[in-house]
Amino acid sequence: MRNYLFLFCVILILFGTYTGNPGSSASTKVTNLVAIGDSITHGVGDPEKKGYIEGVKVKLEEIKKAPVHVSNFAVPRYTTDNILEQLQDKKMNLQLKKAEYIILFIGTNDFRKSAQHQFNPLNSKLINEGKVKFTTNLHKILEHLRIENSAAPIFVLGLYQPYVNYPNHQQILRTIERWNDKIAIVANNFDHVYFVPTLDLFQNRTKSNYFSDSLHPNPAGYQLIAERVSDKVLKELSIK
């Protein structure tokens, strides 16, 4: 009887080893995603504070059939100046080194600050000066990211236009377009850095359906951003 029991245990062990568990943590590689930005990447406007990053995470997990770990370093009201200071943090740099994907969405507060939060009329001189400083800072940020991680693809989001209720909204739109042109140019200076446009996402849509306030998207708005970023990731990296 004892021999039969021993043989039964051996068979169980061998069967378990053979079948394995493809979903176990030991056999599944976790993908690391680092997000950097301001209140938009933080998820302000979404009651659950998931924002668009959660949508990107879910899509990556669906495609890669593996868990995605998100390190979200976004802080409300941050500008590129704040990001440059933040990049001195050792814990953040440790996560950057491990990242397989990096998402950067910054510039909304740089734009607002350069306009002195006065959008009608726009002060073209101040806006242009702010754009120059922003462009310089963005280049420094991407340089640092590449020093910490030379391989991970970086997705840099462009600015959208939430100022549709101003009488001069077309002027504001053209101004944001010029800021986005600079973002795209800076991104193009680095290998495996991809510009993700968002300016068109909310055009010809009823703002109240996609925004929680004058600036921040609601869950429906964040879903549009998540879909745009996910589509860009799949297109550029040919993930199937």
Image (cartoon, rainbow, N blue to C red):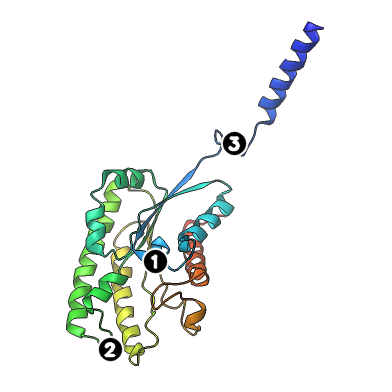
The dot on residue 40 is 1
Q: Residue at x 46, y 63 (%)?
A: 51
The dot on residue 120 is 2
The residue type indicated by label 2 comes to Asn
Q: CA distance from mark 3 to mark 2?
A: 57 Å
Query: Which circle's residue, 3 or 2, is located before the other in the chain?
Result: 3
Mark 3–mark 1 CB contact (< 8 Å):
no
Query: Which circle's residue, 3 or 1, is located before the other in the chain?
Result: 3
Query: Which circle's residue, 2 or 1, is located before the other in the chain?
Result: 1
Q: Residue at x 44, y 78 (%)?
A: 200
Position of residue 6 measured from the top left corner of the image (x, y, whole percent): 74, 11
Q: Residue at x 31, y 47 (%)?
A: 92
The residue that mark 3 highlights is 24
* Picture quadrant of residue 74: bottom left
Q: CA distance from mark 2 to mark 1?
A: 23 Å
Residue situated furthest top in the rendering: 2
Q: In the image, is residue 211 above or below residue 58?
A: below
Q: Residue at x 25, y 89 (%)?
A: 121
